[in-house]
Image: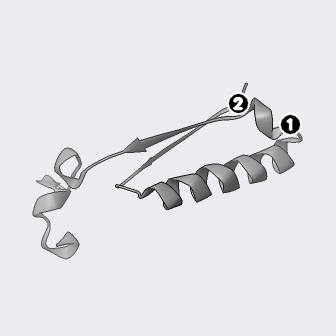
Amino acid sequence: MPVITVEAGTLNKEQKSKLVSELTNIAATVMDIPKQAFIVVLKENEQNNIGFGGQLLSENKLNN
């Protein structure tokens, strides 16, 4: 049972649905495995929980 894991920022329900659908479809095609065999896990990461270059993303002026 293949598992696809995606870590991203906050997504709305429509984005999540489209992402799950499209990732599943392409992986099933490439791997020649039925779509029903796939699990997709979405992990949302807030900018307060990610550091880059010694600074929280939420504190980075380029992201605000």
User: Please, which residue is most extreme toward the front here?
Assistant: 13
In this view, the residue in front, 52 or 38, is: 38
- Label 2's element? loop
As drawn, is 38 to the left or to the right of 7?
A: right
Q: Is residue 64 above or below residue 55?
A: below
- Write down the residue under mark 2: 2
- Asked if residue 21 lies left or right of residue 17, the reply is right
The residue depicted at 51 percent of the width and 60 percent of the height is 14
Which numbered tag is attached to residue 33? 1
Which of marks 1 and 2 precedes in the sequence? 2
Q: Position of residue 54 (x, y in %)?
A: 14, 52
Q: Secondary structure at mark 1?
A: loop
Q: Position of residue 30 (x, y in %)?
A: 83, 49
- The image shows residue 64 at horizontal and vertical percentages of 16, 73
Residue found at the very far right of the displayed protein: 32
Compared with residue 37, is residue 28 higher up or lower down, i.e. above or below? Answer: below
The amino acid pointed to by label 1 is Ile
In the image: residue 46, left or right of residue 55: right
Distance (Cα) linking label 2 and label 1: 9 Å
- Quarter holding the N terminus is top right
Examine the image and state in which quarter residue 3 appears.
Answer: top right
Residue at horizontal 70 percent and vertical 30 percent from the top: 2
Q: Residues within 10 Å of mark 2 (few under 14, many from 20)?
A: some
